[in-house]
Amino acid sequence: MSTALKQAQPGYPDACALQEMREDLAACFRYFARLGMHESVANHFSLAVSPDGRQFLMNPRGRHFSRIRASDLQLIDADDPTTMARDNAPDPTAWYIHSRIHRLLPHARCILHLHPRYATALSALADSSMPPIDQNTMRFFNRVAIDDGFEGMGLSEDEGDRLAAQLGDKSVLMMGNHGVLIAAPTVAMAMDEMYYFERACETVILAYASGRPLRIVPDKVAETTAQQWADYGQLAIDHLREVRAILDAQEPEYRN
């Protein structure tokens, strides 16, 4: 596990930029704890800090999301074969999933993996696709990869490689019988995507529970709405800014 970032090399963040990245990711942990989307001391987020994505920040093993501080985030090197032999080794599933995706998909700068209630419920259905029935569900039209190859917890490089291949160039991986994984260029975009994906899943599950037919819009309308979401990038920036403002007032220690 690397403990020093090669900040002198082109493309690496300087000390101020790295601290800002740490604070953004720490805020993300605390936000999802507030939303009840965490699970015990499990699940994991990571953020690439090197140009190739192979050095990344990730939460330490066994730390509750609501207690994460910027300084708690471990700097991990996906190319370091001794990582899991160290005393402060990360959670094994976190290592095998995040290190392989960061190695294989350098565009996946921020990776969030959760088992939120409604996304996990949808992942347990034989058809885990998201029908376009409202603005939030339409955001993800043709933009979700679905993995139906669950064979147990992700505890091997082969499993991480398989998930990376399934995700490809999409931002959302619906992990069948498991949960969801979001990959995005920034913390703000990943956080916003995870928030809205869980809201969309909630709408779908509640609509299914009614037992009544769904009002599904035409593909053209769904695609137009999805593109309108994609063009509304400022929303994610504003979302994270407001989350941080709330935490600055109520839990400022997250920045430490």
Image (cartoon, rainbow, N blue to C red):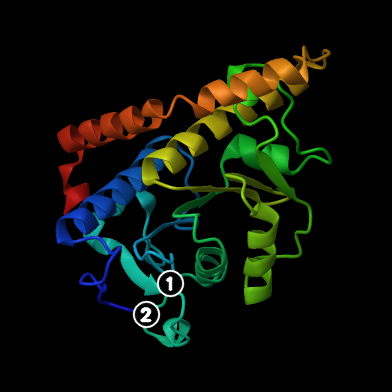
Q: Label 2 is placed on what type of residue?
A: Met
237 sits to left or right of 131: left
Residues packed near mark 1 inside 10 Å, few (<14), some (14 to 19) or many (20 plus): many
Query: In which quarter of the view is residue 192 placed?
Result: top left
Query: Which element is circle 1 on?
Result: loop
Instruction: State the residue in front, 234 or 249.
Output: 234
Location of residue 81 with respect to 212 vertically, above or below: below
Location of residue 32 with respect to 95 vertically, above or below: above
Query: In which quarter of the view is residue 142 placed?
Result: top right
Residue annotated with mark 1: 90
- Closer to viewer: mark 2 or mark 1: 2
Residue annotated with mark 2: 1
Instruction: Name the quarter where the C terminus is drawn.
Output: bottom left
149 sits to left or right of 230: right
Query: Which element is circle 2 on?
Result: loop
Location of residue 33 with respect to 140 vertically, above or below: below
* Mark 2–mark 1 distance (CA, rounded to whole Å): 9 Å
Q: Residue at x 38, y 45 (%)?
A: 187
Instruction: State the residue in front, 192 or 208.
Output: 192
Q: Label 1 is placed on what type of residue?
A: Pro
Q: Residue at x 27, y 32 (%)?
A: 241
Q: Please say if the residues under marks 2 and 1 sit with CB atoms less than 8 Å apart.
A: yes
For residue 6, the mark is none
Task: Return the x and y of residue 70 as percentages of the image width and height.
Answer: 24, 56
